[in-house]
Amino acid sequence: MPLFERLREFLQAHQAGYTHSVHQPALTASEVAKTVVVHSDAGYAMLVVPANRPVDFQEVRIELGFEQLRLATEYELGKLFPDCELGAMPPIGALYRLPVYLDAGMAEERLIAFHAGSHCDVIHMLTAEYRRVVQPAIVPLARADAAHRR
């Protein structure tokens, strides 16, 4: 079954409110949450962060209590998400049996938008609804912009 169909069925099974849009693959980084896949001593996990912010891997490692933490390789992503375009994994851990960690700053936003397996398909939903359905751990993940640190 194609990923988008699995994702749609998952959201419907959880009675989640959402909308789907199809666009040219040119949304800006601030418009869509990014799913960063990491590997730690506990295995693989999804980090959901604002696409325009870098992940502070050292802080995340400490925050989550891991001894080791690294970005998953493209090869690993291909194996973990064979039904997704590279970099367009939906942050729905249940579809892949992976834990999900949502950036604390994003958890307070009203809306969340994320790729649905391709760079053209985007799911839009209330962040509260996303949190109810996905049940991510809420932790600080994203580093502040350089402009905000000055």
Image: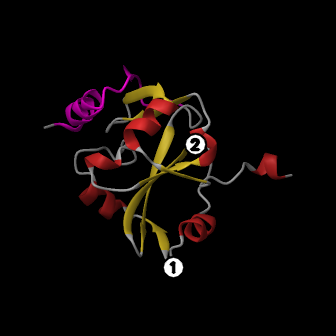
| Residue occupying the far left of the picture | 1
Q: Is residue 109 magenta?
A: no
| Residue occupying the far bottom of the picture | 67
Give x and y (percent) for residue 140.
62, 54
What is the quadrant of residue 79 in the picture?
Answer: bottom left
Q: Is residue 40 left or right of residue 79?
A: right
Residue in the picture at 39% in, 42% down: 134
Residue in the picture at 35% in, 44% down: 92
Establish if 24 lies above or below 105. above
Establish if 132 lies above or below 53. above
Cα–Cα gap, marks 1 and 2:
25 Å
Labels 1 and 2 touching (C-beta < 8 A): no
Residue in the picture at 51% in, 79% down: 67
Check disc 1: other Cα within 10 Å, few if <14, some if 14-19, many if 20+: few
Establish if 13 lies above or below 73. above
Q: In this picture, which residue range is highlighted in magenta?
A: 2-27
Check disc 2: other Cα within 10 Å, few if <14, some if 14-19, many if 20+: many
Give x and y (percent) for residue 83.
23, 45
Q: Is residue 121 left or right of residue 109?
A: left
What residue is shown with label 1?
67
Q: Is residue 52 left or right of residue 18?
A: right
Establish if 57 lies above or below 98. below
Q: Which is more foreground, mark 1 or mark 2?
A: 1
For mark 1, give the secondary structure.
loop
Give x and y (percent) for residue 112.
51, 32
Of the numbered discs 1 and 2, the one sitting upstream in the chain is: 2
Give x and y (percent) for residue 118.
33, 36
Amino acid marked by disc 2: Pro
Q: Which quadrant would the N terminus be assigned to in this image? A: top left
What residue is shown with label 2?
50
Q: Nearer the viewer, residue 75 or 103?
A: 103
